[in-house]
Image (cartoon, helix red, strand yellow):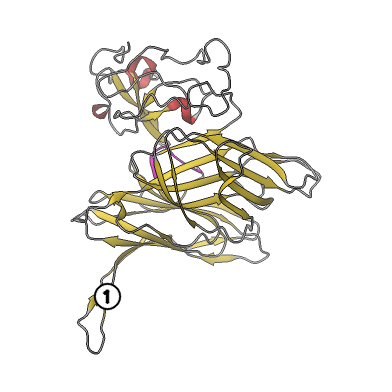
Amino acid sequence: MACLALSTLVSCGDSQAPHPAPLTWTIASGEYTLAPGEEKYLCTTATLPADRETLITAMAPTYGAGTHHIFFAQTLAPEESGTFECRTLFRTTWAPLYLGGVESGRLELPQGVGIRLPRGQQVLIQLHLQNATAAPIRARTTLTATLADPASRLVPAGIFGLDNRTVRVPPRAMNHRTAMSCRPGRDMSVFAVLGHMHKYGSRLEFVRGGMESTDALYETDWDFGEQPTTPRNFSLRADESVSLRCFHSNPTAVEVPYGESSDQEMCAAVMYYTPFDQLDGCIEDGTVRPDAGAPDGAAIPGDGGVPPSSCVQPGESGNERGVGRFCTPRGGECAGSAAGLCLAALAPSAGQWFCTTLCTSDDSCGSGSVCSGDSRGRVCMPARCAPSSDAGAATSDASGGGS
């Protein structure tokens, strides 16, 4: 079961009045056991205090044996209570608050910055566990948040992620490079960076500009056993690009593919930044990007670049909340609306190029739209685009407000 603790201890000196220690809140996984060679995902949920908002200014994990990563998130749709196996790396209804690899350590937000969560909010930690030893493991992992007075006016902080899913490390390759470029499309003041690779990683570089840039923002020789969240202070303009370069060495006789297992490989990074407005990121899956927002000016593939399966086409403006507005992978068409998430940016080749937002009911989606999905996550979409089992819940014009 989840372990929840609030601390308001005070420290006293001989000649000074007591000073309250920082208020903290802790979530702990249920105790887990791993057989030699076993690998699994474990989730634990807990509920924040119901009598006040929670304002986080720091997060510090304590790693149990076998913990490969910790993912701490706000849930946007209810998850089951307590500790349970969850063989999903990420759900769209998990809004990330902290991500850490092996021994990533404490994340301290800058003075005047915080992460604000609603009263009674359910949160979740997910652990990726792997026992690489010859002996059984029995352990527990915790994450402790330092809290501020909910009445404080702090600048909101959040996460922007990059994930290069084209990683393929050839047999016997040494320092094989995989690179991607991304234009976040917003002004950002970054205060910390986390890189992530697996056992075959040798070096990770994060640079301002294109993939051949020498303007380093963060670089490190990779140590799988130590993956720190590193303080870095830099600013990015909305029209600037950043690039991620990962180097892997594969001494084996077989290719190492992209994958979530520690025996496969990844090339990813996270920027913690202010002022946070919405969850976003760049995924490189090998799809050619359209001109809008593409640092390399790549041409639009095919006839206009829009997948034939997309139910929303260029020129459609969506409903009053922006749901169903046509968008391109890095074009920024969804910025400033309630539907600030572009499906094309998350999966350019998956077939749906329109603006949306996470939801739990049809009421939050606006006219002509429904809340569609499953236990992995639900998003708003024009009723005409939804599976037939969802479309019946629409409350008005099924056109979704297009054009």
Crowd around label 1: few <14 · some 14–19 · many ≥20 (10 Å)? few
Q: Is mark 1 on a helix, strand or loop?
A: loop
Label 1 sits on residue: 9
Task: Give the total number of marks visible in the rendering.
Answer: 1
Residue 341 at x, y percent in the picture: 38, 30
Residue 93 forms part of the magenta stretch: yes
Q: Quadrant of residue 8?
A: bottom left
Work out whether residue 133 or residue 104 is closer to the camera in this orientation and state it.
Answer: 104
**Residue at the image point whose x is 51% and y is 66% from the top:** 139
Residue 3 at x, y percent in the picture: 36, 63
> Which range is magenta?
89-95
In this picture, residue 80 sits left or right of residue 173: left
Q: In which quarter of the image is residue 356?
A: top left
- 153 in relation to 287, above or below: below
**Residue at the image point whose x is 31% and y is 12% from the top:** 399
Quadrant for the N terminus in the image: bottom left
In this picture, residue 293 sits left or right of residue 216: left
Work out whether residue 250 or residue 114 is closer to the camera in this orientation and state it.
Answer: 114
**Residue at the image point whose x is 34% and y is 33% from the top:** 358
Q: Can residue 307 be seen in this view?
A: yes
- 171 in relation to 21, above or below: above
Q: Quadrant of residue 164?
A: top right
